[in-house]
Image (cartoon, helix red, strand yellow):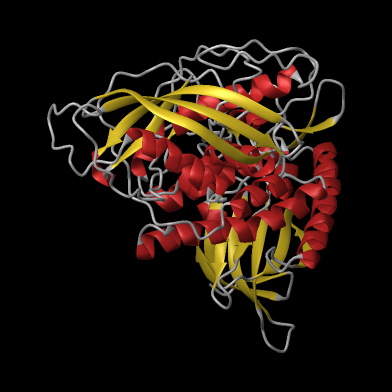
Amino acid sequence: MDTLLNNRYRVIRTLGSGGFGETFLAEDSQMPSHRRCVIKQLRPIHHNPQIYQLVQERFQREAAILEDLGGYSDQIPSLYAYFQADTQFYVVQEWIEGDTLTAKIQQQGLLSESSVREILINILPVLEYIHGKRIIHRDIKPDNIILRHRDGKPVLIDFGAVRESMGTVVNSQGLPTSSIVIGTPGYMPSEQAAGRPVYSSDLYSLGMTAIYLLTGKQPQDLETDSHSGEIIWRRHALSVSPTLAAVIDRAIAYHPRERFATAREMLEALQVGIVNFPATVAYQQPAVAPTSPVSHLQPSNTPSSPATLTNTVAVSPRAVATSAPVNQSNNQKGIVLGSIIAGSLIGTSIMIGLALNKPNQPATQNVEPVASSPVATTPATSINENTTPQTPITQQPVQTTPSQIPTSTESVVARPSPAEAVENYYDTINQGEYRSAWNLLSPSYQNNRQLHPNGYLSYLDWWGGQVQSIDVEQVSLVEANSEIATVDAQLNYSLKNGKQVPSSVRFSMLWDADNNRWVISGAK
């Protein structure tokens, strides 16, 4: 092909074509280096002279925006020029030498979790800047992110605004508007498909892109929960850590209000998870009848910090700025905090605690805001699908007597004690090893959306941000067999606001045979 555009750009080959026009790789014949560039040829969908004028105005405005964006970040292609010829509009941009994420998967297969995390961490600051300019990309997908050869950084290409200007029409009020929806089915959320994109629409698209990189599955190949509308993807990525999975889950939540509000918030959530946690082993949940979740959960009306996931239950009292007295229940010490301790604070804390203590149970909770019985329930991640929690701490095997654990199916000689597992859980928290403690909760407990709206990050927000320490005053085994156990504990929470909150908690435990340990599946 020997085509010269604008008497300057020699077309080398066609890179792609679609309803809006074509994209070419070209070289600039007027530059000494004959540098390569990408030229996008765009054509209006209407040829009405009035419409054409509107398209021209919009095109010039969007081109100016691209120039501004490219000048700020080297992860956005620079705009070299734009021009019009034969009713066609052309944008000339920097040629990024690299591979799209789609090509990367086709060449080498699925990306590792660390690679996906690195891509997200490097692209989110770019989105933060773009959104700060009140611009929504609207077409983030594997084809529109290029891993640059020279430094491996992800580069965001193909903004939808310029293409949208080609769809300009005049509405019934005589005002210019766009008649087209920019985005790719599967990668764009429902509100964007309806023509009402928001900033978190880009985060949804980025989350779906991350799922593709981890699973190789296109959005249309994934199931959707018929009740909640959430994407079911975890079964295809069982080795993904709960932290990253929770971040992705929140990014792709069906309702925009449940997603990260900003790119910065999502970035902080990822960075909170960038810690050298112990290696983990996928946990196989035994077939046990679900038990009702804990009453000590994190209240839904408690605001979460940017690094906090919405689906978290704290196994400890949650501080809430409310002075209403809290009702005590479920083996909790009859201590009326009344006006001395904000009822909501304690109730919430307790609820959170209980929720966390009820890890492996589906979420049918009897939630009672208990003021004086905050449970050491840790917020669990809001994960829709099969979560593969990591196995942080392996407890020292402790011999137990037949009276403690009846010999029903397997040998109990080398089995740890359920009571000791509870003590170990709180020791782990007191040592600041929150990730390890989180992994001592069963997957169903972690994944309970009602108890752990924001997953691990909410858990971390509670234990790392509000609780100073937990004093385990007494732990006693109530009953146990080869698969389940019940443990009572008397606890005292020291909160960072200076409050002391006593609590009586009954823990439900499940035996994790793969890792030779007990995990907490519930608390009340």
- Which of 283/113 is in front? 283
112 left or right of 209? left
Asked if residue 359 shows in the view, the reply is no
Percent x, y of residue 501: 66, 27
Percent x, y of residue 115: 48, 62
State the residue at coordinates (31%, 26%): 485
State the residue at coordinates (72%, 17%): 337
State the residue at coordinates (43%, 63%): 104
- Which of 71/366 is in front? 366
Percent x, y of residue 519: 37, 36
Q: Quadrant of residue 71?
A: bottom right
Asked if residue 264 shows in the view, the reply is yes
State the residue at coordinates (74%, 69%): 6
Percent x, y of residue 403: 22, 26
Q: Is residue 388 placed above or below 82 in the rendered structure?
A: above
- Which of 34/504 is in front? 504
Q: Quadrant of residue 399?
A: top left
Q: How many numbered circles does the render carry?
A: 0
